[in-house]
Amino acid sequence: PFPYYNSKIRQQPSDNAFNVIKNFDIFELPKHTIKAQIVMFKEQPHVSVSKFMHSPYNPNGLPTGKGIFMPVQAWHALCDSVDSINKELNGLSKSTSVACMKLNNELSITNII
């Protein structure tokens, strides 16, 4: 039911679901002509971020106009030619998830947290 993260669906206001641990500069994904901002979140034990990646509408977890979360391994496949990002990905644990947002989208970190 949740192919992408929808900012209209609120997390519980009592606690933040994700902690921002890295905010990359805007770059162009090497395999997709889309300029995106990459934001990394540390996944909390009671929140499953990776479920946003799996959906029949977006089986490969490709970036869309909405914020999308995907496991670190999936970002390796997208960003393998971007050295600076690949180095960051190599240092992350499996409990870290990543969000992608298009430049011209109004999603912000405050919408996601």
Image (cartoon, rainbow, N blue to C red):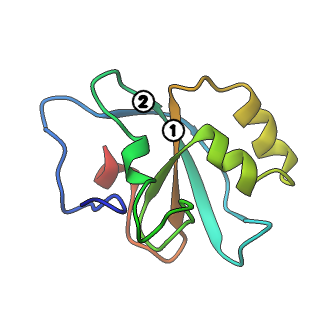
Discs 2, 1 touching: Cβ within 8 Å: yes
Q: What residue type is labelled 2?
A: Glu
- Residue at the spot 50% in from the left edge and 71% down from the top edge: 64
Q: Where is residue 68 in the image (x, y as percent from the top left)?
A: 45, 57
Instruction: Classify mark 2: helix, strand or loop.
Output: strand
Q: Where is residue 48 in the image (x, y as percent from the top left)?
A: 34, 35
Residue 106, quarter of the rendered image: bottom left
Total marks placed: 2
- Residue at the spot 38% in from the left edge and 64% down from the top edge: 107
What residue would you read off at disc 2?
A: 43
Outermost residue, front direction?
56
What residue would you read off at disc 1?
A: 97
Mark positioned earlier in the residue sequence (2 or 1): 2
| 108 to 85, vertically: above or below | below
Q: Where is residue 112 in the image (x, y as percent from the top left)?
A: 33, 50
Within 10 Å of the Cα at label 1, are there few (<14), some (14-19), or many (20+) other Cα atoms? many
| 106 to 108, vertically: above or below | below
Instruction: Classify mark 1: helix, strand or loop.
Output: strand
Q: Position of residue 86 (x, y in %)?
A: 79, 41
CA–CA distance in space, label 2 to label 1: 6 Å
Left or right, 6 with reference to 20: left
